[in-house]
Image: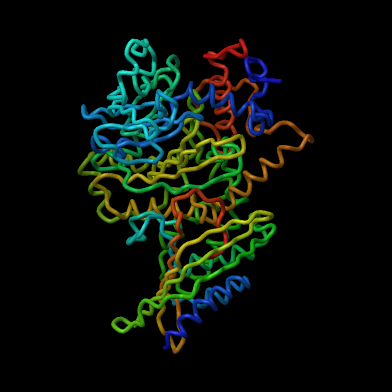
Amino acid sequence: MKREDLVDFVYDEAHTLDQMEWETWLALFAEDGRYWMPLEWQQEDPILQPSLMYEDRLLLTVRVERLAGERTFSQKPKSRCHHLLERPRVISMGEDDGVYKVRTSFLYTETRGDLLDRYSGWIGHELVEIDGALKIRLKRIDLINFDAPFSNIQLFI
Amino acid sequence: MDRYRGNPQAIADLIKGYAVHRDVYVDPEIFELEMEQLFPNSWVYIGHESQLKNTGDFITSKIGNQPILASRHRDGQIYVLHNRCPHKGVKISSEPCGNTGKFFRCPYHAWSFKTDGSLLAIPLKKGYEGTGFDADQASKGLPRIRNVRIYRGLIFVRLADEGLSFEDYFGDSLSTIDNMADRSPQGELEIISQPIRYMHSCNWKMLVDNQTDTCHPMVAHESSAGTAVNVWERAKAANPDMDPPMAVQLYAPFMSPYEFYEGAGIRVWPNGHGHSGVSGSIHQDYEDVDGYLQMMVEAYGEKRAHEILGDVRHNTIYFPNIMVKGPVAILRHFIPLGVNKTLVESWVFKLKGAPDKLYERGLMYNRFINAPTSIVGHDDLEMYERAQEGLQSDGNKWVNLHRLWDENEPEEATDIVNGTSERQMRNQFYAWKKFMIQNMDTKAGTAG
């Protein structure tokens, strides 16, 4: 795996989300993959500290199916999203444990009807190689204002 | 021109029992009067004493639109103060919590105050000599709120000097707080983390109403809880040996049928308090946590331990603006910011001495149901905001609360009713009317 492959993975994943290809996006996660959005600064524990999200594939599948549901009233009209990413910074090439680590600064925008909400912070990817392909073991979103009161965040940063 | 200020009859006329006028949700003047009348006349929750462990610890909050401050003084007591400098009105503390050391210091002119609110020092003190300053209210420091009551660690405040005592205001409804605290083998709750905060573009009462609305979960939450059940059933079919994970245990009961909620019952108490889930609730079938029952039996004895854990009340409203969920030790605080703007803070208590798994469950429930990133929350917020917009319609100026209404329904009663009744919402509005017009000054335009 080359550094360039990790960088491409991060951009491609964001593109998948911006295109609202949720099923394709979900398939990027390893079977035991997690999506985590902490609620505290430099949070270390997703279990006994509060988080905005900490979800496994079962729960992410619920979200993806919900977005397509006929009675998903908060998605009438449907939200859209846009990721603006700084060049990802490779933190680890997995020399010791086989886990590639990448950190990316972002601006994320999500619509809700006529409203536009904007969030910024850092995305941390922990990636592993499974059958020759990179998969997400952990996607961590640290918002700069994790403790602010938000309205609905319905899609995926 | 004011329609409601100084006019208690006009306010009372908004509440018909089986219906309430839309102005209670959408009228800016009504919102102002709630800030001036309803909140000061009520006992309002501001925080938990575990947030004020050490001398100099403080928290800030609001009662209605008035900023307040609570701090732990060196005598060990908690003092609740108006959070405004007696000089020019500057807010003394702007953070939600912290430690101020030995004194508070105003950032504008460095007037300083002890942590019980009394004035400590003013720069250039000589400039006040012979001016009569000593007789002015400003010389007394941060005004102290007299009516403060700490119950099982929860701090409640009544701003108005006169009114119902704490005991008369809450009465038997305190049994829910007792049950939540008793779920700790030590009988104590603790706050060790921040709340999840969620901003709502709707009136605060829409959230309060919803806490005992048992006819919406299977409809509004079909999108979230219903999908969760479907996804789980597929996973289970593929792997029949799987036990439902904690997440599924929390989501699935939302899809219970009307009959379940009807049978679970609603209990009402005077002054607007009440709860859903009398004989059962969506919290009743959670998996046991290893070792917890044994701890409880050791702490309370066999009979009492089962009594405590068998009481699985769903949502308890403490009028006006908190909801307590005992079985998962969650407290939700509905903070009104404007007629159509409400901040919700959802806190999880740690049960002292109980296994971590219970705290994990509470935190998980909170982010699944009460977070801006929660799909269940998305369903609810959508409904509140649509209601806030829909109520602008002149097609019908009344919000209907007719379900299981009785024209002889008492406005101050303890009662247990069918769990799909709208009785608790009506109960809240009887209290709303009472505290809105209590001691109302009927001479408009007086500077108090």
The one nearer the camera, A25 or A57, is A25
| Residue A107 drawn above or below residue B267 | below
Q: Quadrant of residue B287?
A: bottom left
Q: Quadrant of residue A63?
A: bottom right
- Quadrant into which the N terminus of chain B falls: top right
Percent coordinates x, y for residue A130 in the rendering:
42, 85
| Residue B382 drawn above or below residue B26 | below
| Residue A157 drawn above or below residue B351 | below
Percent coordinates x, y for residue A116 in the rendering:
63, 56
Name of the residue lying farthest toward the right? B395
Q: Is residue A66 left or right of residue A113?
A: left
| Colouring chosen for the image of the structure | rainbow
Q: Is residue A156 visible?
A: yes
Q: Is residue A49 left or right of residue B44?
A: left
Percent coordinates x, y for residue A45 in the rendering:
33, 60
Q: Quadrant of residue B174?
A: top left
Percent coordinates x, y for residue B101 in the rendering:
25, 37
The one nearer the camera, B417 or B158, is B158
Residue shown at 47% from the left, 70% from the top: A57
Residue shown at 43% from the left, 62% from the top: A142
The one nearer the camera, B154 or B292, is B154
Residue shown at 34% from the left, 43% from the top: B309
Q: Is residue B189 visible?
A: no
